[in-house]
Amino acid sequence: MSASSLIPTTEPRFQVPDVHGRFGQFGGMYVPETLMTPLLDLTKAYDEARRDPAFQKAYADMLVEYAGRPTGLYYAEALTKHCGGSKIYLKREDMLHTGAHKINNVIGQALLAVRMGKKRIIAETGAGQHGTATAAVCARFGLKCVIYMGATDMERQALNVYRMRLMGAEVRGVEAGQRTLKEAVNEAMRDWVTNVRDTHYILGTAYGSHPYPMMVRDFHRIISLESKQQMIRAEDRLPDTVVACVGGGSNAIGSFFEYLDEPGVQLIGVEAGGRAIKTGEHAARFAGGRLGVLQGCMTHILQDGEGQIEGTHSVSAGLDYAAVGPEHAYYHDKGRIEFAYANDQECLDAFQLLSRTEGIIPALESSHAIAHGCKVAADGPRTNIVLINLSGRGDKDVWSAARAMGVEIKL
């Protein structure tokens, strides 16, 4: 795989965004005037970098030498037998350095920040995997690193908080609102407004103002670029279905991107159904959201009739967000990507199932995809193939999962 093929400079035939950062009616640049200049500068810098062979090579080299790509394509034979239907494959993003897909994007954005002469990095994190990846890459490049994290998420992801601090990052807890991801994004944006001269904001998902949804998608495109080639080698054909969990949507759009022009491949994003599809009890934007603007872009948002953002809930910190990436909203409306949800109990059941059948402990975020992917496989013919993106490993979630299942871990 050549380095120049990693980040697309030409798009699939119906791909977006347009020059204004819009995916149809979604996306755009809804930010304070003080952020327009840095965002336009970032757009210009990324456009130049994505066409620069030297940047492409540096990115490709770090994916291999630092992140540990390519990740494996694993036939989950025991899980397949348990489900009793279609063959199940896992794309093993959990095998990457720092434990999740997040490192793909962080490497790309850190290289871009260095190229732009930035010395300080800020980021938001929910489950802590984006924060951990950011801390690691900042340590590698000698960049000052500040991570914003909701206080509730800090409590349920204490291990990742320690890992970030161990690698030299300053982790700032956010006590406002629900004390989760939305509030962490707010604080990161306030920081960026104040420190635009020397600071780059490494946004962790395919969300926010242009160019972030496009840029994050491009850096995660490597997931489907690899899986498409690996599936052809393993089965001499493409999968029938690709399944990925969706919070903001970074691992999902990366998993789906190379299949968008393959009409025979079904694409399914799985949101957090929480305790129930009731106000404040879930984070399934396509099950209960409305069109609106939040934190930089227009998309589907959990909000009331007056535009007030509703509370969210998920057993997984990384899916507990009121809005979904604009590109997912676009493909949902076009009918290209289907969306489902898994509730907390289904997630916890899948967390245990994969652990016990394959000896692989998945992140709670990924467990949503496992839960729905197993349903698809169980209902499908044995001749079909279901590919599930295992976006991260579950070490970080063992304590909170045990607590949710009523188990006390004693040391």
Image (tube, rainbow, N blue to C red):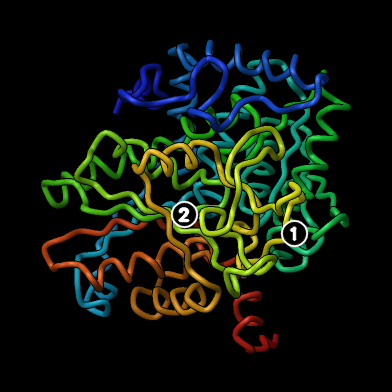
Residue at (48, 68) in percent of width and height = 342
Name which residue type carries label 2.
Ser
- Depicted 403 relative to depicted 61: above or below: below
Q: Residue 391, which numbered label? A: 2
Label 2 crowd (10 A; few <14 / some 14-19 / many >=20): many
Residue at (75, 14) in percent of width and height = 37
On screen, residue 168 versus residue 72, left or right, reads right
Circle 2 SS class: loop
- Depicted 132 relative to depicted 374: above or below: above
- Depicted 102 relative to depicted 346: above or below: above
- x, y percent for residue 235: 13, 52
- x, y percent for residue 185: 75, 43
- x, y percent for residue 39: 69, 20
- x, y percent for residue 124: 72, 44
Q: Is residue 14 visible?
A: yes
On screen, residue 289 versus residue 382, left or right, reads right
Residue at (63, 48) in percent of width and height = 301
Label 1 crowd (10 A; few <14 / some 14-19 / many >=20): some
Question: Looking at the image, which is closer to me, 307 or 43?
Answer: 307
Q: Earlier in the sequence, mark 1 or mark 2?
A: 1
Residue marked by disc 1: 162
Circle 1 SS class: helix
Question: Looking at the image, which is closer to me, 369 or 55?
Answer: 369
Q: Quadrant of the N terminus?
A: top left
Residue at (59, 36) in percent of width and height = 106
On screen, residue 115 versus residue 150, left or right, reads left
Q: Quadrant of the C terminus?
A: bottom right
